Image: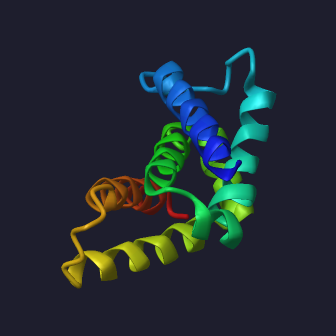
Amino acid sequence: TIIQFFEKEAKMFIQFWQRFKNQRSFKNHKYLEKLIQIFEFLVKKRLACKIWYSNAPQENILRLFQCIRILMRDTVFMKASKEYGVATLVVNKLTFYSEIHLAGDQEDVYNTDILKELLTICQKLSAEGT
C-alpha cells in the first residue's frame, strides 16, 4: 500500500541521514557515483515531483530536505544543484511553507523544521552564488 511505501521511504531517509549526518566532504567517498545518483533522484523524483510531493507525509518531506542539505555540504553537489535547478525548487518550497507559517497554521508539527532545512539550503546556495 501507499502507507507502507512512505513508511519504508521514511526509514531509508533516516538511515541515510544517520549514516552521513557528520560527513562534510563526499568528493573522495568510495560511493561518490552512487551518491550523485541518489542526489539526482532526490531532486528530480522527489523535490521536483508534484505527485510525490502532494502525497508524501510531512515527515518524509522533512527527511528529504535533510538528505539534500547533507549532500550539498560538498562542492560536487553544489555544482549538481545548479544543473538540476535546485535553487528555484527550494525557493518555491520556502515560499509555500512560509505562507503556511505566516497564516498561523500550526497543525503541521513538521512545518518549522522544514522551514529551517529550507533556509539552511538557501543560505548555502546563496553563499555559493547559485
Query: Which of the pair 106/83 is nearer the observer?
Result: 106
> Seen in the image, is 74 located left or right of residue 31?
left
Q: Is residue 40 left or right of residue 12?
A: right
Q: Residue at x 64, y 41 (%)?
A: 4
Q: From the viewer's perspective, is 52 left or right of 122?
A: right
Q: Residue at x 37, y 73 (%)?
A: 97
Residue 26 vs 114, above or below: the answer is above
Is residue 36 depicted above or below 80 in this figure?
Answer: above
| Count of residue discs | 0
Residue at 74%, 57% (x, y): give it. 45
Task: Check the image and report above or below for 5 versus 19.
Answer: below
Q: Residue 101, relative to residue 21: is it above or below? A: below
Residue pictured at 56% horizontal, 36% vertical: 13
79, 98: nearer the viewer: 98
**Residue 27 position in % (x across, y down):** 66, 27
Relative depth, front residue between 22 and 106: 106
Q: State the colouring used for the structure image.
A: rainbow
Q: In this rendering, would 10 be left or right of 30?
A: left
Residue 85: x percent and y percent?
A: 67, 67
- The image position of residue 82, as x and y in percent, is 67, 61
Q: If the image is split into quadrants, where does the C terminus sit?
A: bottom right
Report the residue that reaches farthest toward the front: 1
Residue 93 place in picture, x, y as percent: 48, 72
Quadrant assignment, res 33: top right
Which quadrant of the structure image shows residue 28? top right
